[in-house]
Amino acid sequence: MKKFSPAISALIDALRVLPGVGQKTAQRMAFQLLDRQRDGAAHLAVALESALERVGRCNTCRTLSETPECPVCADPERASAGLLCIVESPADVIAVEQTGQFQGQYFVLMGRLSPLDGIGPADIGLDRLEERFQQGQVKEVILATNPTLEGDTTAHFIADMARRYQIQASRIAHGVPVGGELEYVDHTTLGHAFSGRKTVL
């Protein structure tokens, strides 16, 4: 005998795609939406459908955007700074922006190098990043990949690539815990990390 109806089972399975949501949490969320928050559930469904239709990726930096070019990339003052911050995800862009410490542009990798998982340079857009280096407008790259083994490997790979184009490469420094994720670091700590960035050797 099945525990849930097909519709409820499908909703529970769909909710499990969210990070940190297991079977039990998905069940509680599903019953909360169906039993006590039906209006909220309907609003959530409409908002999600709208976001999926309207939100894509910026053609320049690859962050999430409702326009072909995000507001940061469209800002000529930020482009003229010659600073390019490399991050792993769109959530990291928001985290850095909230510090108020950075006035350059971004490039979102959408991941990090992980040879064991078969993720190479082309899989995270390093060919597109190199095209930006070739344009000659970038003076410094700030490597803000997460302080994990894969994040450090990715940062060193990009630093080597930047040197081939005589571009200075620096890495965000103190304040960010080893093994931590940027989107969970508080604004003050991340701001100090940007202020204390160091050149990658």
Image: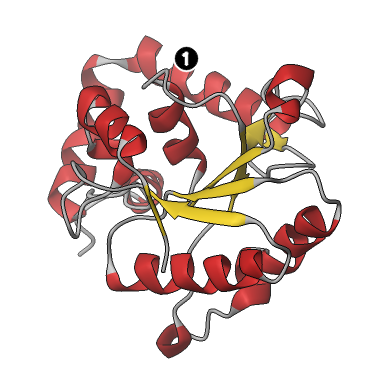
Residue 134: percent from the left, percent from the top? 83, 59
Query: In front: 134, or 199?
Result: 199
Query: At x 39% / y 10%, what residue is drawn?
Result: 39
In the rendered view, would you say 120 is above or below 199?
below
Query: How are the colours assigned in the image?
Result: secondary structure
Query: At x 30% / y 39%, what residue is drawn?
Result: 196
In the rendered view, would you say 80 is above or below 62?
above
CA neighbours of label 1 inside 10 A, class few (<14), some (14 to 19), many (20+) = few
- Amino acid found under the numbered disc labelled 1: His
The image quadrant that residue 61 belongs to is top right
Residue 156: percent from the left, percent from the top? 46, 71
In the rendered view, would you say 148 is above or below 146?
below
Q: Secondary structure at mark 1?
A: helix
Residue assigned mark 1: 43
Q: Residue 75: in sight, yes or no?
A: no
Q: Quadrant of the N terminus?
A: bottom left
Residue 28: percent from the left, percent from the top? 16, 37
Horizontal side of residue 162 vs 199, given as left or right: right
Horizontal side of residue 177 vs 81, given as left or right: left
Residue 18: percent from the left, percent from the top? 34, 46
The image quadrant that residue 120 belongs to is bottom right
Q: Residue 149: in sight, yes or no?
A: yes
